[in-house]
Image (tube, grey):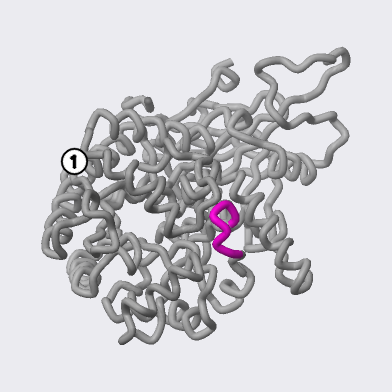
Amino acid sequence: MPSDKPLERTIYVGPFVHSKTFDELELCEDGAIGVDEKGKITFVDRHGTGVSNRPGWESAKVVRISGKGFFFPGFIGPDSHIHASQYPNLGIFGKSTLLDWLQTYTFPLEGSFSDLEKARKIYNRVVARTLANGTTTAAYYATIHVPATNLLADICQTRGQRAFVGRVCMNSTLSPDYYRDESAEQAIKASRECIEHVKKIDPANELISHIITPRFAPSCTKESLKMLGDLHRETGVPCQTHISENKNECELVKELYPESKSYAGVYDDAGLLTDKMILAHAVHLTQEEKELIRDRKSKISHCPASNTAITSGCCRVRELMDTGIDVGLGTDVSGGFSPSILEVTRQAIWVSRHIAMHEGDHVKLSTEEALYLATRGGAKVVGLEDKIGGFDVGKEFDAQMVRLDEVQDGDDELDDEDGPVDIFGNESFENTVAKWVYNGNHQNTVAVWVKGRLVHQTKKFAA
């Protein structure tokens, strides 16, 4: 658990890496980042002089990287799309596609969250696990249960993770009778209760926000979507949902909403397609839908691991961004098999390369571009680009310390503490970062900070 002691001025000394632009990383091998008592970055020194001769910082606390490693911004989604309640089903999807996967695995698990002790056990674990993987900001789907959804918000605040916590709304008869809202009115009432709870625990939304969450169009009646759109407009609370994940789903939406021009049009007609909407997946959008989403300034969470696992399809991220849509990354636990945005970064690259084998190299995502999606891109998706996403003066210090194992002469056996990335000493800084991107995991994330507060550490950091 993070300490509740007041923050002190701290200088983080050592190499750092962050995205300068969509396709360019800044690699600073001798840096110092000054963070004030409010958790904001006050200065960034790229020549290692920040400790010794910075006026007013002579007595600041100093955190140094020992060994091979670097500071990197916290992942945002990222995790911009994750079902916290589905965490126990991680890696369990059988031979399913989306609609039967929901009925077989997902709804029975989510329906059990009326048991608060079960919810507590699972939610504590998923927040701890995402923090350990460097995720400083997550957009969570909870369940239909108000007490359990509020519990997740409490846990995120206690553990110090930035979070958008959504009570899932689903009142259609296509949802199982044991797990759905009684009516559209009841869904709105329950969502209001969750909004009010977040106002009580975090009035200024410094860390926690509610997020209005219609599961997806087939789970909601037209009346429910319209009322959720009205609630969104009234409160200004952000929204999240799914769109065009699976071809059968898209056909079902056409049947259920024949009066709407498209799947995106369903949300637009309800008043939900705004600049505060996060749309997950977006695999099978038409060009007209892409342009509508762009015009409404809605955002997309790309979930490559999930789209592959449930054989939904390959999202063409380059086309989305070329259209002018902001894109971030989502694990989509438990459709996705890992709670790690680093793993999803790799998967985003692989998916783009599979598309490139058929459509040409112009659709590929580079390492630099994928890391942008995992940080600054995710910050745009959740509407926090002015606060987080990089090491810029004025931004809040959401960061992870990455440490890699240096192979020494005589190291013939692996130690239990060894991580998955071996550094032999002849790698350039650029290649060191690449080895982490393609081989790293949570063992390399030895400390995590949110708004300047230490929220996760391992023995390697304490040592």
As displayed, is residue 240 above or below residue 227? above
Instruction: Inspect the image, locate mark 1, and give the three-letter code of the amino acid beneath it.
Output: Pro
- Nearer to the camera, 154 or 336: 336
Percent position (x, y) of residue 80? 45, 54
Q: Quadrant location of the N terminus?
A: top left
Kindly report the secondary structure that dominates the magenta region of the rendered protein.
Answer: loop
Quadrant of res 24: bottom right
**Res. 375 visible in picture:** no
Magenta span includes 310: yes
**On the picture, is 89 further left or further right than 224?**
right
Q: Quadrant location of the C terminus?
A: top right
**Res. 91 visible in picture:** yes
Magenta span covers which residues?
Answer: 308-313
Q: Residue at x 45, y 39 (%)?
A: 89
As displayed, is residue 456 above or below residue 164? above
Q: Residue at x 68, y 62 (%)?
A: 352
Percent position (x, y) of residue 429? 78, 41
**On the picture, is 414 further left or further right than 281?**
right
Q: Residue at x 40, y 48 (%)?
A: 104
- Nearer to the camera, 295 or 213: 213
Quadrant of res 183: bottom left
Q: State the SS at label 1.
A: helix
Percent position (x, y) of residue 227? 18, 70
Q: Residue at x 66, y 30 (%)?
A: 403
Residue to which mark 1 is pinned: 147
Percent position (x, y) of residue 392? 53, 52
Q: Residues within 10 Å of mark 1 (few under 14, many from 20)?
A: some
Magenta span includes 48: no
**On the picture, is 67 further left or further right than 330?**
right
